[in-house]
Amino acid sequence: MSGDGPPLLVTGLPRSGTSWAGKMLAASGRLVYVNEPLNPEHPPGRCPGVLNASVTHRFQYICPDDEEPWLAAFSRTVALRYGHLAELRRNRRPRDLARMAKYGTAFRLGRLLRRRALLDDPFALFSAAWFSRRLGCRVVIMVRDPVAFVGSWQRLGWTVYFHELLEQPLLVRDHPCVEELRPLVGSQDRIAKAAALWRVARRVTADLAADPGIRVVGYEALASAPLEGFRDLYAWCGLPWTPRAAHRVGAACTAPAAAPASGFAWNGLSRTAFRPMDSRAALSSYRGRLTPDEVSRIRELTSAPV
């Protein structure tokens, strides 16, 4: 534990609003924002100064049975202990060195100012219970409407490779619903695959919601009333809802929509999906991305009770 409370983890499937929620919580001025340490791509992942452990899969599963070396690595991360030597051994390009300076400085200042670590990481979703129970994190899981979620993936041309989940036997053991993904291995049907991932993630999230250290937050409810929603979320996370935080959240959630074509925005040296937006208007953005038949199909694929 660092600062004046537990570390935070904001997770949920990619494109479920984790970056937005994380940045709005960071607007408190009481947190050090850490962007996707479990992302297997570099950047933002594979930075041993931030997390000195080897990520081998998207949606890396961590549980007590295989927590070494994760416990030691993440304990340093949430304590805001940056590993300069470990980073230099692997990453020496100019941009890497700039990231090292950024994170090294942020971690050191965070300790001095008694700030808490905030991990924004959609790839931690299936391991959320471990973060809550072993690291003492307060965990926020973002859940988005399936049509909006699939529509966002379609716009970006994303797909998911289910072998990365199915090749993790402890994940399949602890969350047997992951086996439902096996028939779609190798499929080129991106809508069916994204819908299946949403369904499995929703079932896992429903189980995780029983943990008192985990809170499930609906993207649509938060986007409809961001000031009220984030004020409540601040209280649950143990963060002060100050006039400065309210102003920053309000300004970031009522900005005109001007998204880059890629759907991403660069914030300093961290590439995240967050950008200032009109959060209420964003709720209907999927309508231009999917045909009525595709919307009906997604609803059918994801409509069975969780």
Image (cartoon, helix red, strand yellow):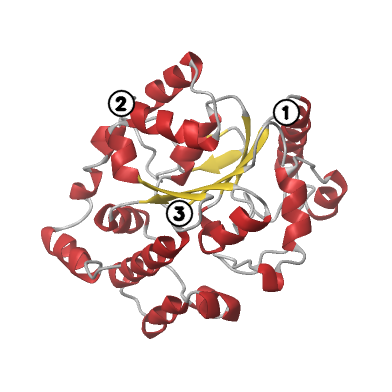
Q: Residue at x 62, y 57 (%)?
A: 133
- Nearer the observer, 97 or 103: 103
139 displayed left or right of 94: left
Q: How many marks?
A: 3
Provide the residue designation for mark 3.
12
Residue 48, numbered label: none
Between marks 1 and 3, how big is the CA–CA gap? 27 Å
Q: Give the alpha-carbon distance from disc 2 to disc 3, as whole Å.
A: 25 Å
Give percent across and percent down for residue 4. 68, 31
Disc 2 residue type (three-letter): Pro
What's under tag 1, amino acid-wise? Arg
Q: Residue furthest left?
A: 292
- Earlier along the polypeptide chain: callout 2 or callout 3? 3
Locate the N terminus by quadrant. Answer: top right
Residue bearing the label numbered 1: 114
Question: Hey, which quadrant is residue 301 in on the image?
Answer: bottom left
Position of 134 relative to 244 (above/below): below
Asked whether disc 1 touches disc 2, contact meaning CB atoms under 8 Å apart, the reply is: no
* Mark closer to the observer (2, 3): 3
Q: Say if residue 258 shows up in the picture.
A: yes
Q: Say whether disc 1 or disc 3 marks the residue closer to the N-terminus.
A: 3
Mark 3 falls on what kind of element?
loop
Where residue 269 appears, as percent x and y from the top left, is 62, 37
Q: Position of residue 248 (x, y in %)?
A: 45, 21
User: Which label sits on residue 256?
Assistant: 2
The amino acid type found where label 3 is placed reads Gly
Q: Residues within 10 Å of mark 1 (few under 14, many from 20)?
A: some
